[in-house]
Image: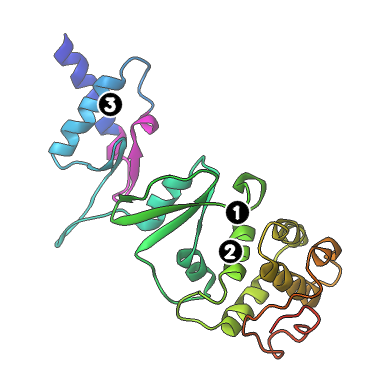
Amino acid sequence: MYIEYMKSIAETIKQKIDVLPPGSLLRQRDIQIPAGKDLAAAKALSRLVKKGYIERLERGLYYKPEITEYGSLLPKSSLVINDILVNKQAYVTGTSAFNRFGITTQIPSTIVIAANSYRKPRKIGGLTVRYRRSILKTGNYSAEVLQLLDALRAIKKIPDTEPNEALIIIKSIIQKLPESQKIELVDAAMEYTPSTRALVCAIVELTSPDIDIQKLSDSLNPFSSYNIGITDTVLPNKYKWKIR
């Protein structure tokens, strides 16, 4: 009876995996096994791993391998990252995010995730994932806004690009944001460094003069200046905001 019970669980799981395209990720909770059958499901998944039908990335996370003439391929990095972020107040930052915006051509070997709480670095699906505490509670702001602010904050340190080049791209992205996100950007910038706030003021003043930046402007020390390496051809109003 127990053997038949285990067999039915294994067959149910295999049938669900059969319809997945190669490269798909799978968590045990996604299989929707009836209550009380979790242990049987875990054993069935382990057997499927031993047979090479699925591969294990980490505890509770599997993928259906794509088989080529060179062997089994790891799942796409984007799928792994999305799985890490799902239902979590977190977002990808650092070089990976800056690359997605086109600010840098460098493709990092380590993915940096900003989250409300810190976690130890981990390796998963061929990726090294490092965490850092986010400057703001990520659930309150869109990932794109926080990524743009992170880029402005790190503008002198972004690999394979100069501050002027980076700012041209960032300014263009901000200009195309819907008004609601521009307002969100100004509001979120209040928690960032003074140089980041100054850059946001200058960019928004140039690209969206109707957006209210008074509160952000008032937060800046009138006697401070910010040596970033931006030319007035890229930021014509830089002197007003003490940007060099």
Residue at x-position 18% and y-position 21%: 7
Q: Rounded to the nearest whole Å, what is the CA distance between mark 3 and mark 1?
A: 45 Å
Disc 2 and disc 1 in contact, CB within 8 angstroms: yes
Q: Earlier in the sequence, mark 2 or mark 1?
A: 1
Up/down of 244 relative to 82, above or below: below
Name the front one of labels 3 and 1.
1
Q: Tell me the magenta residue range.
A: 16-31
- Residues 153 and 63: in front is 153
Residue topped by disc 2: 150
Q: Earlier in the sequence, mark 3 or mark 2?
A: 3
Residue at x-position 20% and y-position 19%: 6
* Residue 26 place in picture, x, y as percent: 34, 39
Q: Rounded to the nearest whole Å, what is the CA distance between mark 3 and mark 2?
A: 46 Å
Up/down of 113 relative to 201, above or below: above
Q: Rounded to the nearest whole Å, what is the CA distance between mark 2 and mark 1?
A: 9 Å
113 with respect to 150 (left or right) = left
Q: Earlier in the sequence, mark 3 or mark 1?
A: 3
Residue topped by disc 1: 135
Residue at x-position 82% and y-position 67%: 217
Structural crowding at the residue carrying mark 1, measured as other residues with C-alpha within 10 Å and reported as few (<14), some (14–19) or many (≥20)? some
Q: Amino acid at mark 1?
A: Ile
On the image, which quarter does residue 173 sit in?
A: bottom right
Residue topped by disc 3: 12
Determine the secondary structure under disc 3.
helix
